[in-house]
Image (cartoon, helix red, strand yellow):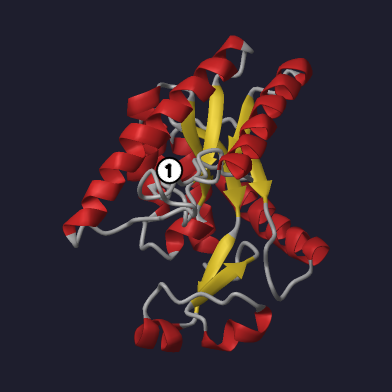
Amino acid sequence: HGNPIHPDPKHAAKDVESFRNTVLLAERMEVPVIVGFSGCPGGSPSDTMPNWVTYRWPPEYREMIDWQWKERVVPYWKGAAKFAREHGIKKLAFEMHPNFVVYNPKTLLQLREAVGEEIGANCDLSHLFWQGCDPVEVIHLLGKNGALFHAHMKDTVFFPENKDRFGVLNFAFTTEELPQASETFRAVGYGHSASQWKAILQAYMDVDYDGILSIENEDPILSGEVGVERAAYVLKNVRAELLGTT
């Protein structure tokens, strides 16, 4: 959970060290996958804060994206992937997360193409639901490209009245702001139906995913233990249906 390409050198150095130490620890523990984020640089050499650019216009924003990838993103991750490879770690699983340059399957595959096969996804669909992605299509795409390394089981619920008025880029920063938000994280089954999660698990089976399905609870309503238990209940039941063991 860091930003090794942060424009503040001190901030970046701390997260670079954290990544390298994680690689060394994973090597000693024989852990094959490291989960993290791509990070986000500034938009120019003089920036002091990250600049997450998602739209092409005005033209200087297109120039910023090109500069970020050419001068910061690709050079850093080429070196980081090489370091990981030298220590036996062949899978760096990026969570596709807003505010980082890898935030959807397209940018994930873009980095993979530029850096190498060490780059793959921690597929956390909660960040992709609100972007309008079809979860089954995402899993099939990543699986087809050999880029599915890890998976977070977390849901997102939409509040239609707010979404219709304010769009999807309308988040709550505190629980007190939830009544005005367009969406928020929920435990599995509290944003999308059990049938949707059944289709999601089927998609993982379709691509022969044999990694971990890790329940991540960031539900602002259900406490950690309760949220995990309820997510596990949904996932166990839909898995049993798929395997014909109900």
Quadrant in the rendering for residue 102 = top left
Res. 110 in view: no
Q: Which residue type does callout 1 highlight? A: Ile
Q: Is residue 190 above or below residue 206?
A: below
Residue at 68% x, 54% y is: 216
Q: Is residue 211 above or below residue 158?
A: above
Find numbered disc 1 in the image and state the secondary structure of the residue it sits on.
Answer: helix
Residue at 34% x, 56% y is: 53
Report x, y in % for residue 234. 66, 59
* Left or right, 172 with reference to 57: right
Q: Which residue is mark 1?
A: 139
* Left or right, 174 with reference to 130: right
Q: Residue furthest top?
A: 86
Res. 216 in view: yes
Q: Say which of 192 and 163 sits in front.
A: 163
* Left or right, 224 with reference to 110: right
Report x, y in % for residue 198. 53, 54
Q: Say which of 117 and 174 sits in front.
A: 174
Residue at 22% x, 51% y is: 62
Q: Say which of 206 and 54 sits in front.
A: 54
Which image quadrant: the N terminus? top right
Q: Say which of 149 and 23 sits in front.
A: 23
Report x, y in % for residue 192. 52, 67
Report x, y in % for residue 145. 36, 29
Residue at 60% x, 57% y is: 154
Please rate how many residues cluster around mark 1, counting C-alpha atoms within 10 Å: few if below 14, some from 14 to 19, many from 20: many
Q: Is residue 19 above or below residue 229?
A: above
